[in-house]
Amino acid sequence: MPSPSARSVASPGTLRFSVLGPLTVHRGEQALSLGPLKQRMVLATLLTSVNSPVSVNALTEAVWPEEPPRTARKNIQVYVSALRALFGQDDPEARERPRLTHTGGGYVLRAAEEELDLLGFRSLLRAAEGRPPQAAAPLLRQALDLWQGPPLGDDLRQSPTLAEEAERLRLRHVTAYESWAEAELALGGAPAVVEGLRDLVERHPLRERLRSAWMCALSGSGRQPEALAVYDDYRQLLARELGLEPSGAMAARYRAILAGDTRAAGTGATGGPQGGRPGAAPPRATVLLPPDLADFTGHVEELHDVLDLLEGREGSGEASGGFGAGETGEAGHVVLLSGPAGSGKTTLAVRAAHLLGGRFPEGRIFVSLRDAEGRARPVSAVLAELGERTGRTGPSTPEAWREWLARHRVLVILDDVPEERAVRALLPCGGQGRVLLTARGQLGGLAPVHRIAVPPLDTAEAVQLLAGLVGPRRVRADREAALRIVRACGGSPLAVRVSGMRLAVLRHVPLREFADRLTDPRGALDELTAGDVSVRQRLAHGWETLPEERGRDAGRLAAGTGDGPFGLTEAAEALGCDERHAVRVVEALIDAGMVTSPGGEVTAHAAQYDMPHLIRLYARGAGYGTPVLT
């Protein structure tokens, strides 16, 4: 919904702005002349941040990306004055409700939802989110009909800032088209989407969601050989370009089409099957998931392992806790993603859930096991939420929940599990349902569980994520500083993302200066805050759940083992105990997610242990136990 300030300027028959195609402004049916190129660049920059202040520095960078003239600020004022005249702000009535104003943070261009196509597009996407195909398809079609061509046209893309914004808008369009196509496929409209998907796949050959929908559309149109060829082409392209294989969900769809399963024709990458009978209504799926990140980066192997396990492919991953895959009945009734705060566990779980719509046609549900303050929620509260989200009535008992879960093909994400007893009563004992857990620790008291450790991003992946947030041009201009930033983040996707969000706002701050801030251990965690997202706060929540004794142990290890891997002898010295006791402490901290263990099998005395960089910084600032939060 538009803000009150945006609604207040809306009046029928005045101005209509468009950026989803060539930049245009209409008064009634008359197209207005928008002036010279640099003035249009100022207008486009204001419209893409509509109803929010845009600083003079940001406008200057958009118009003069290389070396702005000394008169840049004065020129911006001239362009703004011309735009005000164009909007009719010289009219006495318009002065009471000015459309383009200057605030302490910069210039603000105000528009209502019905006045700017971008706002209407966003509103329709929000309205379609989470709705069944019958309701979502027309809303998504309306959103797509607002587009008149490549966003912002061609001439404005001479500005790297606007070129990056146009690319973000273009990807939003592709995502919306994918969602619309999947909704149409679920409703049996495969022939209507085949050609549009073909055109988009040609422009975006590596987008798996597009490929998957195109396969389903071809299969649903009776063109199975072409659908199978789409998969083979994609598999070869992935292997050639990236050295990867298609995801487990994509491979399962291929096998279904190969086996002649007509239900695959009505299944999108994130949607449910159409159903086996002609004319049958698609099953109503409960899909209550956080949005999938368009810039999901890294963790490719871990994602494939999760998909394979949850799809029931035996031999995938590794069951731990004393039971093998054969003893659990199917390959992955319960899968645990573990890693320190900010490692990307939740993002990975959500990505997997979005890709597994065809495997879980009766629903995919996300529930957090902590409240907003990081405290563990009672099992009774979690059960009540699960009952509400699955539409169940009657007593909310663990037994009733497990019985329901066994009978339904649903995937449930239980996020940020604080300890075993918070989740033990909620896990399936067989049947059709699957549970995907995320936790900072290993939850060693749970069995049988398939455990997948979520490692830090490697340097290339972290730089890729940063570039997507601050712009590739800015990273290319100082790649050395970008490398320093991601290394100072310790490969944490959360920390890299917060750095990128912060730098996207602080466009005047050079990457080199921000890298200097992050490499100062005294203030690094204070810099990793963007709006209401704080790395320090996430780390604090994890620390507060540690027993007091373990908190002191973690602090001593952080203070006494340097900045890299350490052995058992160093740990014993830092802890002030013998090596026999040090082994128990280190392994308890591994179980709590505060220390990482070696990848291969070695003896405890020969192993090299490590503490994630940001946890080490936090622990050193905490003293030997109780952290001082700032």
Image: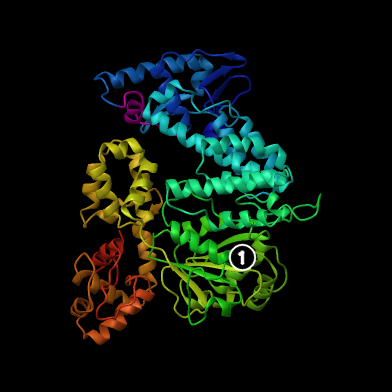
Q: Is residue 93 left or right of residue 286?
A: left
Question: Badge 1: how crowded within 10 Å, few (<14), some, or many (20+)?
Answer: some
Snapshot colouring: rainbow
Q: Quadrant of residue 283?
A: bottom right
Q: Is residue 205 visible?
A: yes
Q: Position of residue 180 (x, y in %)?
A: 64, 41
When the figure is inspected, residue 151 is found, relative to residue 310, above or below; the finding is: above
When the figure is inspected, residue 363 is found, relative to residue 608, above or below; the finding is: above
When the figure is inspected, residue 479 is found, relative to residue 451, above or below; the finding is: above
Residues 85 and 201: in front is 201
Q: Is residue 142 left or right of residue 470?
A: right
Q: Quadrant of residue 378?
A: bottom right
Q: Is residue 70 left or right of residue 107?
A: left
Residues 586 and 536: in front is 586
Identify the residue at horizontal 71%, vertical 46% (top origin): 220
Q: Which residues are magenta?
A: 52-65
Residues 183 and 263: in front is 263
Please check the rendered image and state whether residue 62 is part of the magenta-colored stretch, yes or no. yes
Q: Position of residue 397 (x, y in %)?
A: 65, 76
Q: Position of residue 351 (x, y in %)?
A: 51, 55
Question: In the rendered structure, which amino acid carries the disc numbered 1?
Answer: Glu
Residue marked by disc 1:
385
